Image (spheres, grey):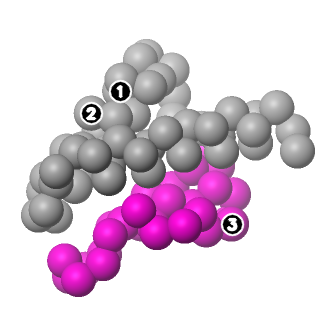
Amino acid sequence: MLDGDAFAHEIAALLIADIKTSGARTHGELEEACRISLASLLGDTAIPPQIAVLMPIGLDRWPRVVVKGRPLPDV
């Protein structure tokens, strides 16, 4: 695994933990939790291009965090 990939996986794992503990329940709250978490984790650093957060259309599922095309466990 490349250093950039390892960094992206670490950030993604921390993002998942932050979302789970945020108490967010609505789509807007989930988006805000993601923004706050990424700002806290990365500061002014750009979000690694390998990371994507896929928001569900309905609220019956949690967002999925994907690193370089490999989905991580559901949040």
* Disc 2 and disc 1 in contact, CB within 8 angstroms: yes
Quadrant assignment, res 34: top left
Q: Is residue 60 left or right of residue 43?
A: left
Q: Which residue is found at the position 54% from the left and 67% from the top?
A: 73
In the rendered image, the residue lying farthest to the top is 44
Label 1 to label 3, Cα distance in Å? Answer: 23 Å
User: Against 74, is 14 above or below?
Assistant: above
Q: Which residue is found at the position 35% from the left and 27% from the top?
A: 39
> Which of pointers 2 and 3 lies earlier in the amino acid sequence?
2
| Residue 67 percent location from the top left of the image | 63, 55
Which amino acid lies under the numbered mark 3 shown in the image of this protein?
Arg
Label 2 to label 1, Cα distance in Å? Answer: 5 Å
| Residue 28 percent location from the top left of the image | 13, 56
Quadrant assignment, res 56: bottom left
Q: Which mark is residue 70?
A: 3
User: Against 29, is 73 above or below?
Assistant: below
| Residue 42 percent location from the top left of the image | 47, 23
Please give the residue where the numbered disc 2 appears in the rendered image. Answer: 36
**Quadrant location, the N terminus:** top right
Which amino acid lies under the numbered mark 1 shown in the image of this protein?
Ala
Please give the residue where the numbered disc 1 appears in the rendered image. Answer: 39
> Which of pointers 1 and 3 lies earlier in the amino acid sequence?
1
Which residues are drawn in magenta?
Answer: 49-75
| Label 1 residue SS | helix
Q: Which residue is found at the position 30% from the left and 78% from the top?
A: 61
Tag 1: Cα neighbours inside 10 Å, few (<14), some, or many (≥20)? some
| Residue 66 percent location from the top left of the image | 57, 61
Task: State yes or no: residue 52 in magenta.
Answer: yes
User: Against 57, is 55 above or below?
Assistant: above
Of the pair 52 and 59, the residue shown nearer to us? 59
Which amino acid lies under the numbered mark 2 shown in the image of this protein?
Ile
Of the pair 22 and 49, the residue shown nearer to us? 22
